[in-house]
Image: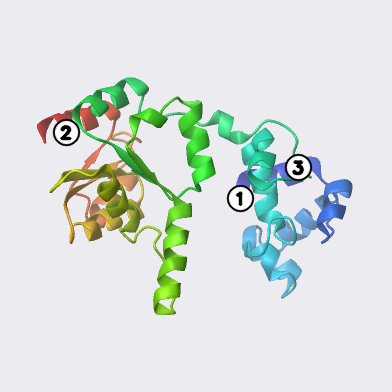
Amino acid sequence: MNETLFYLQKRSSEFNREVQDLATRKDFQRFLKRVQTSGGGLRGIRKVQGGAWDGWIYRKGEIDQENVVKRIFQEIYLGDQFPSLYGFGPLFHKGEGLYLHERLLISRTVLGALRRKVRMGIASGRPRFEAELALRRFGLIAYFKSAVTLDECHKEEERAKRSTGRRSKRTKPHPYSILRVIREIGIPSPRCAYVGDVVDDMVAARRAREKVEILAIGFAPGGKKDRTAEESLRKVGADMVVRNPQELLQVVERL
């Protein structure tokens, strides 16, 4: 959100609600000043907008219609990959995508060593297009036997709704994505570990334990000086927390 507002502040000068007008006029400066004097952030937007255009504030609606926040974010994040996903061109940002600045938290060397010892899969909350974009960029697709993304979780939600008449979430902290990865990898009676860096990852792994033998391993790369992330992961049930990829490799070797 901060990156989006920074971009708007840098490139714009008065607000208009129509998407096409926003693209051609880029009049955001006055709007941003009003938001700032009203407290900033989403709270400031709500005060300025009142009850108008909740879809814009709450990120609802279609990306090619009223959902301007999502459109701007996706254009900035995806860059030249935006048309490949959505089938139409960008309006606000025609430069490179921020995804090009992402870096690996675990090196290919360590991933390669892990791959030789265990079968790996991905349970991601990102859309499949974005997950595969990152995997292709770093040359990692072949490292993983299964990848379950936001797309598969949403499809399972729709399937469950047709069956029961009720919608229930399958995204983390629900264990669906983790359990599906384990099933797709296909090892009978597997001993598993799930590595994640946020609270929902640990909660999902703990819930998956009702079905399979699995360790919840937190990943907190901030180092010893930053204990906040580690404490949060332990608080929700992480069996252990590692601070760097080499430590993770050592843990796997001991399993």
Q: Which mark is residue 89?
A: 3
Provide residue 51's location: percent of width, then percent of height.
71, 75
**Mark toward the viewer: 2 or 1:** 2
- Find out whether the residues at labels 3 and 2 contact each other: C-beta distance under 8 Å: no
Query: Which of these two is toward me, 192 or 232?
Result: 192
Q: Amino acid at mark 1?
A: Met
At mark 3, the secondary structure is loop
Label 3: few (<14), some (14–19) or many (≥20) C-alpha neighbours in 10 Å: some
178 over 66 or under it: above or below: above
**CA gap, disc 1 to disc 3?**
22 Å
Label 1: few (<14), some (14–19) or many (≥20) C-alpha neighbours in 10 Å: few
Name the image quarter holding residue 39: bottom right
Query: Which of these two is toward me, 190 or 242?
Result: 190
Residue 172 in view (yes/no): yes
Would you name the residue on which mark 1 appears? 1
Name the image quarter holding residue 16: bottom right
Query: Which of these two is toward me, 238 or 127?
Result: 127
**CA gap, disc 3 to disc 2?**
46 Å
Q: Amino acid at mark 3?
A: Gly
At mark 2, the secondary structure is helix
71 over 17 or under it: above or below: above
* Rendered residue at 31%/27% (across/down): 111
Provide residue 201's location: percent of width, then percent of height.
33, 51
Quick one: label 3 or label 2, which is nearer the N terminus? Answer: 3
- In the image, 69: left or right of 14? left
